[in-house]
Amino acid sequence: MNWPDLSMGGYGFYIWGSYLFALLAIVWELVTLSYRKKAQAQEDSSPKVLRGSTHETTS
Amino acid sequence: MNLYKYASPINFYPLAGKLIPWFATPAAILFGVGLFVGFFIAPPDFQQGDAYRIMFIHVPAAWLGMFLYVLMAIYAGVGWAFNARLASMMASSISITGAMFTFLSLVTGAFWGKPTWGTWWVWDARMTSTLILLFLYIGFISLQSSIEDPRRADRAGAVLALVGVVNVPIIYFSVQWWNTLHQGATIRILAKPTIHGSMLWSMLIMLAACWLYSVAVVLIRVRCIILEREQNAARLVEATV
């Protein structure tokens, strides 16, 4: 097993920068999804969905 | 078991909820394993040193950006051709994750390009066609959100998605068709890979992690879309009765 040093042979900024961006992108996606779910729950907490819609696959 | 019943958004909604943990949990585990193999097992590259380790996120992001576009176009096409609501909802759900991965592939590519090519960006065939892919995703998302009627929005989006799918083979073959700074394919189906086994394994594990993550997130989002659209339908029914 190799223990990489944080400087990554001088490429640390580029490597950690790209992984930080990846982490931010994933966190952004999950946070926006969570807000969307929360907004939905606040808008209508009653199970209206099943009252008005059908089980058909097409509109 | 009648699988056809899951083509109905209402029946698919609880199934998607049950499936999410089965994709999200392995995704989290595989992210950890892939990064461990990539940073602790895989040796430095003889030419690029440690800079190549960006590959473990860049390549899966780029592959998923392309693959999710094709999947989105198929769902959009099926939704349009067969008037299948769930397929159109899936296309909408995939578009945001696909755009995120395409954006990520461009950003990580820039981070890799600077130390290896000496520049963050060049208007080279691979990078330009990937940027066009991002614009196609953004166009699809914008078009869908700008049309109020979901069915009309689905049809308009399907046209754009199906026309834009021609860009995917252009991205893939751009390194063969044109002289580009971007390196050619390292992994081919019929040929032996040209990278060390641990590098290959790390990349494949990260690809699997990104794929499982995508499925989980798409399922979460499609549940939101089902609720939003079906609630609107419910209100319309209530208003007209």
Image (cartoon, rainbow, N blue to C red):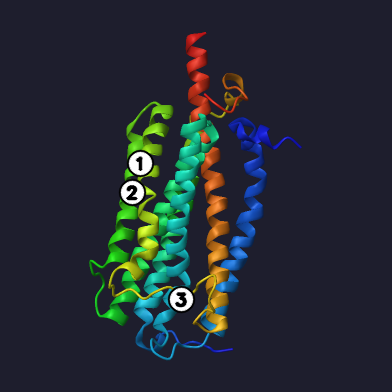
Tag 2: amino acid:
Leu
Q: Is residue A36 above or below residue B167?
A: above
Report the mark closest to the observer, 1 or 2.
Answer: 1
- Residue B60 is situated, as x and y percent measured from the top left of the image, at 48, 66
Q: Which residue is mark 3?
A: B186
Q: Is residue B124 above or below residue A14?
A: above
Q: Which residue is mark 2?
A: B136
Labels 1 and 3: the sequence-earlier one: 1
Q: Are marks 1 and 2 in contact (CB under 8 Å)?
A: yes
Tag 3: amino acid:
Thr
Q: Residues within 10 Å of mark 2 (few under 14, many from 20)?
A: many
- Residue B239 is situated, as x and y percent measured from the top left of the image, at 47, 12
Q: Chain of mark 3?
A: B
Point 30% across, 55% down: residue: B132
Q: Are marks 3 and 2 in contact (CB under 8 Å)?
A: no
Point 52% across, 8% down: residue: B241
- In the visual, does B114 lie left or right of B82? left
Is residue A41 visible in the rendered image? The answer is no
- Residue B162 is situated, as x and y percent measured from the top left of the image, at 40, 43
Question: Hey, which residue is sitting farthest bottom in the picture?
Answer: B46
Query: Which element carries disc 3, helix, strand or loop?
Result: loop
